[in-house]
Amino acid sequence: MMEGSLKYNISIIGLGYVGLPLAKLFVEKGHTVYGIDANEQKVNMLLKRQSYLTDFRKNEIRGLFSTNRFHVGTSFEAVAKTEVVILCVPTPLDSNHQPDLSYVLQAAQSTIPYLKRGQLFVLESSTFPGTSEEKLKPILESTGLLVGRDISLAYSPERIDPGSTWELAQIPKVVGGVTPSCTAFAKSVYSAAFDEVVVVSSPRVAEMTKLLENCQRFINISFMNSLLQVSEQLDINLWEAIEAAGTKPFGFTKYYPGPGVGGHCIPVDPLYLLWKARELQLDLPFIELSHQVNETMPEYIVERVVKSLYPKSAGESSVLVIGVTYKKDVNDMRESSAIPIMEKMQEAGLKFEYFDPYIHELTIKGKKYRTLPLTARNVKKFDCTLILTDHSDISYELLVENSTIVLDTRNATKNMKDRQSITLL
């Protein structure tokens, strides 16, 4: 801690969708941040004052460096200069849908030569309950420093919502330390940047909090997706029914269907909890069923595309895909349902191109695609327009006016007057 005030020197490991906004917040609050990322391309872009995130403009990157309190690099040596170490690295699933903690464990191991007495070590990456105490605590104590006496360890789940209007400081920060002193240290650090800090009794509770938030959304969105086929057969606009149900002033929360559940958190976090439950020889059938529904959505979407094109066959048809990122107004492709949908379109023999203002090129099963300019002339070339991501800066009027068929998985065309060519999925 710096003398005279609650200002900290902080190492933030991982400068992605979580780490970079967190670094910006701490710098804006007067703290000094040493950003560490193994990706040299990211570090070089930052050093050139360039941004790789849609939520960050170049002038914001320049502003960070202009404070002289923001430093970036690939070396972990900066950890030795700081009182706080925050881990914001990916926690994906492996090919068998099992938790992959390799980034967390490698990053923790890399800090070992530079850890010192009196530091606070915080994990923010989504993970299963028990990770902080069962996986990180032994690594930290391999230095001879004891957690709770010589070094502090806590968990604080990230709650960033890319592309939203939420200010990071306004999102309450949950913290849980291994010991009361660990919790107190973590609370002090986050209170120096966030408007509200919510203290829980342990890292396990904090870890469960993150999973609980995303399991709720995962299950409810998947439930809505499971209603799509029923609604199709009953000739019901499910979106209209959801809006009508949402007028009830109590007991109902609106969740919407879509082409699948994307992003790092919602499709991944529940499977971390499912894995942990199975380790305890317990079942979580709601998560299992939701995962099954989510996995079938790409096939269902492609079936609807092929059905809409009849009597033309798939091999004779072409589709313009609108939006390929996992959510609107971000350049994040993690777990995007557009990828398996386009893969299945390839398998079905459908020819397709795509437009996305945030993704300039893609490779689908070895074939390279570049985003197509969105013009009336280009839209008219295709037999069908498939909306997968409802980016705000897309002209849906242009799409509707120039498409023979529009399949809308996001209700992006809800305000269009002429809806004869539109089918909501």
Image (cartoon, grey):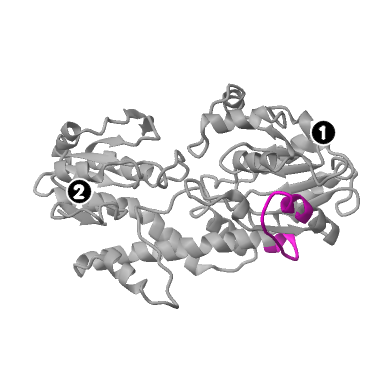
Q: Is 189 on the left or on the right of 161, as rendered?
A: right
Q: Amino acid at mark 2?
A: Val
Q: Quadrant of residue 321?
A: top left
Q: Secondary structure at mark 2?
A: strand
Q: Residues within 10 Å of mark 2 (few under 14, many from 20)?
A: many
Check if mark 1's residue and mark 2's residue have beta carbons within 8 Å: no
Q: Which residue is mark 1?
A: 81
Residue drawn at x 55%, y 47% is 93
Q: Is 141 on the left or on the right of 95, as rendered?
A: right
Q: Quadrant of residue 213?
A: bottom right
Circle count: 2
Q: Which residue is mark 2?
A: 406
Taking the image as drawn, is residue 279 in sight? no
Give the magenta range. 187-205
Q: Residue 114 at x, y = what percent?
A: 83, 34
Q: Disc 1 to disc 2, how far (Cα)?
A: 56 Å
Q: Residue 3 at x, y = what percent?
A: 88, 41
- Between residue 177 and residue 204, name the one nearer to us: 177
Q: Secondary structure at mark 1?
A: helix
